[in-house]
Amino acid sequence: MNLEYRLPQGIALPPGRMITSNEGDGDLQPLWLSDSPTSAEMWAQLRSEHATSGLWPLLLTSLNSRDNDFRPWDCGELSPERMSSPDDHNPEELLIRWWHDYTATDEDDDLRSTAELLAVTAPFGRTWPGTAPGRSIAADPDGIAEQYAHAFVEQNPLARLGLVSAPRGADALTGAGWNGPANYDNDTATFSAVVRSWEERFGARVVGVGFSTLHLSVAAPPSGLDDALLIAAEHFAFCPDNIWQGAQRDLAAYAEHLIDLGSWEFWWD
């Protein structure tokens, strides 16, 4: 990826370098990474030029603030070689499969009873409720993303800039070879397929990515509990740790948290 010829005139990148994946033959460079922290203004400028450059900007964080290797980015813990394409996957079929996998009950579970397991996903239990309908997107998704980028950098002042050659933000996750949800599914293209659907239905935009975290802005969040419950079910299927290990330990509480929330954040253990 030759940035010099792909960036529009007038955009000067900070010092940085192409990152080589440490898997495969070592000949893939899926990501450009800045050497030092970036600004929300730089992210927004590059985002606005995506249609021309074909490069999707990401605000990247590391495993922890004391991580000298800025994992996984700086040390190339990326696996683009093993990823399929988001085009290969149906997002609703993925959500249904994941939902049934994560709502399965086990009578031998020593930590929670069957009733306790099913209570997490009440009122649906094991029954998949269907995907949430798309919402009318009145706000500008890119403007909402820029606002969120400022909030993200304020909360993560060490965030660096990443650039990935990708047609959209969802695909940048696969293009970079990001392995964040690998404990659940080591093909990031499956997650990109679902994020694509959220881009279309809710005006979501990929803004930030960490070692095992994903941060989206959302232009059309749910405004009522019924819609929020359906979206919460999708979030549980996509990232069950959000509820299993989050502040809201059941679907109903998590759904209330989503109402009018302009950003969605995910963390996989």
Image (cartoon, rainbow, N blue to C red):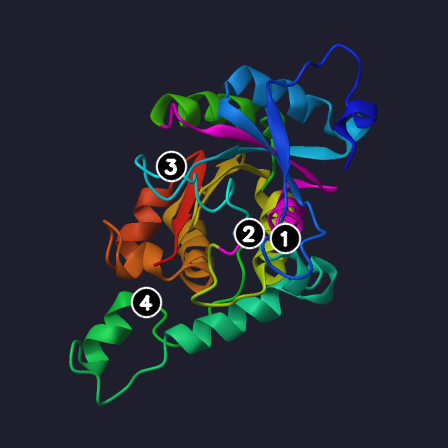
Q: Name the residue under label 4.
A: 121
Count residues near mark 4 (Cα–Cα under 10 Å), then give few for <14, some for 14-19, many for 20+: many
Proximity of marks 3 and 1: CB atoms separated by less than 8 Å: no
The image quadrant where one finds the N terminus is top right
Q: Name the residue under label 3.
A: 68
Q: Which of marks 3 and 1 is in front?
A: 3
Whether residue 127 is visible to the viewer of this picture, yes or no, is no
Q: Distance between the residues labelled 3 and 1?
A: 25 Å
Q: In this view, does 52 lie to the left or right of 256?
A: right
Count residues near mark 3 (Cα–Cα under 10 Å), then give few for <14, some for 14-19, many for 20+: few
Q: Which residues fall within the magenta stretch?
A: 156-179
Q: How far apart are marks 2 and 4 (CA)?
A: 28 Å
Whether residue 14 is visible to the viewer of this picture, yes or no, is yes
Residue at 42% in and 51% down: 212
Which amino acid type is marked by label 2? Trp
Q: Mark 1 points at which residue?
A: 174
Proximity of marks 4 and 3: CB atoms separated by less than 8 Å: no
Q: Nearer the viewer, mark 4 or mark 3?
A: 3
